[in-house]
Amino acid sequence: MQTGARLGLGQRLAQVQKSRLVRQNIILFAGGLVAGIGGFIYHAIAGRVLGPATYGQVAFLIAVYAVGTAPALILVTVLARYTATLVANGNTAGVRSLMTRTIRLVTIPGLLFVLVTTLLARQLAAFEHLQSALPVLILGFSIALIWQVAIPRGLLQGLQRFTALSLNVSIELIVRTIVVFGLLLADYAVSGAMAAVFIGLAFSFVLGLYSLRDHFGHVGARVRLRVMAGFSLTAAAGIIGVQILYNQDVILAEHYLASHDGGIYGGLNKIGTILYFLTLSVSQVLFPRVVEAVAKEQHPGRILLSSAGILAALGAGALLVFAVVPGLVVGVLFGPRFSDATPFVLAVGVIGLSLSLNNLLVQFFMAVHDRMFLPILAAGCVAEGGLIILFHAGVGQVVLDVLGSLVGLLVLLSIRCYVLLPTLHAESVAEPEPAVG
């Protein structure tokens, strides 16, 4: 009996090891882990050197930057879906055209955004009590650059080149962390923290283009970007919704809470998003795999269930650490001046896991181009912001606001998925193939 049980377990482990989904998740998880560690070391360095009050300004700017990356995430999603469909149909000749035309197209709004940021820099700095407008200017350039970085990342994801994508994501945060340490030691404070973001993005963009160099010599048919317009609207709504969910709380907390409490909550938000960023690879793998399954008339529900299981397993490990040694987590990341955050570490861990599961479902809905999830997601965003505006007596109250809204949203999205899955077939989600020529 025991021998049979061991053989059965061994066979299951062998099947897991041979699974393409698992291998792809491991590759992207490794990159996400490095990027996550780099990102939190970046915040730990800033928090320790600057202190809670000044770090709160950095947390605010990074939150605004994260909101500004929404167009980049939309680009990644749209380009990944378009490219994955091309690959599934055996047509990769248009990748070069897609890349070059998108770069030219995105340059125009990028330059306009830099101009608007330059004109409004002083007013934005005054709103958040920044001592200088320079960090806001650097923020504007960084947001414009991340829109360009998104283009090679979207193509790599659609091509399922997860090793190159993993390296691209991790190198950005490695460079950012190294640079911020030197700039803060040189006493550049908030401006140095934001300059490190820009420099990391520049390295990532160059690396992304290098990873796609084999497509530079392919002269294929000219792709028509108009065919992506319909899905772009769905992707925009989904991506912006998720971005709002994990950034508006920091912005509102910094506005409503005292300076010290705002910094404490900014640190808690970063601790909570450990789970989100560590498990982000699961949704990144899920998306092109689901698109591929739909294009090949395969039901993608099994991929979703397997991905949710992988995500839950990863999240459970992190939650265990948060529950057992919350003080150590705060101490290692931010130091003793953030000790007031310790009682809320497990709660923000649950927030991070809920956000990850919500994002996984949103990615699935976008991959099959379902639009019914959009009003549910919008209601979740409104609920989170409304609760914080109404109830913000302290850090603990804001944590409860966010936790309640995210768990409620997860329940509603899960119900939508339960209703959708039995009716989901290739013909029900089929769209016109990407046109070339």
Image (tube, rainbow, N blue to C red):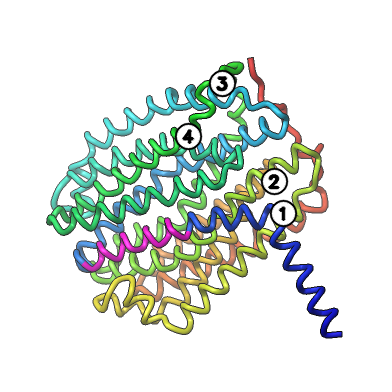
Mark 2–mark 1 Cα distance, whole angstroms, equals 7 Å
Which residue corresponds to mark 4?
151
Q: Which image quadrant: the C terminus?
A: top right
The residue type indicated by label 3 comes to His
Q: Residues within 10 Å of mark 3 (few under 14, many from 20)?
A: some
Residue drawn at the location 64% of the way across and 19% of the way down: 436
- SS for callout 1: helix
Task: Residue at 20%, 48% (x, y): give it.
Answer: 125
Residue hosting label 1: 303
Please name the residue that numbered disc 2 is placed on: 290
The residue range painted magenta reads 33-48
User: Real-space Cα distance between discs 4 and 1?
Assistant: 26 Å
Other residues around mark 2 within 10 Å, as few (<14) / some (14–19) / many (≥20): many
Residue sitting nearer the eye, 144 or 420: 144
Quarter of the picture holding the N terminus: bottom right
Which of discs 3 and 2 lies nearer the camera? The answer is 3
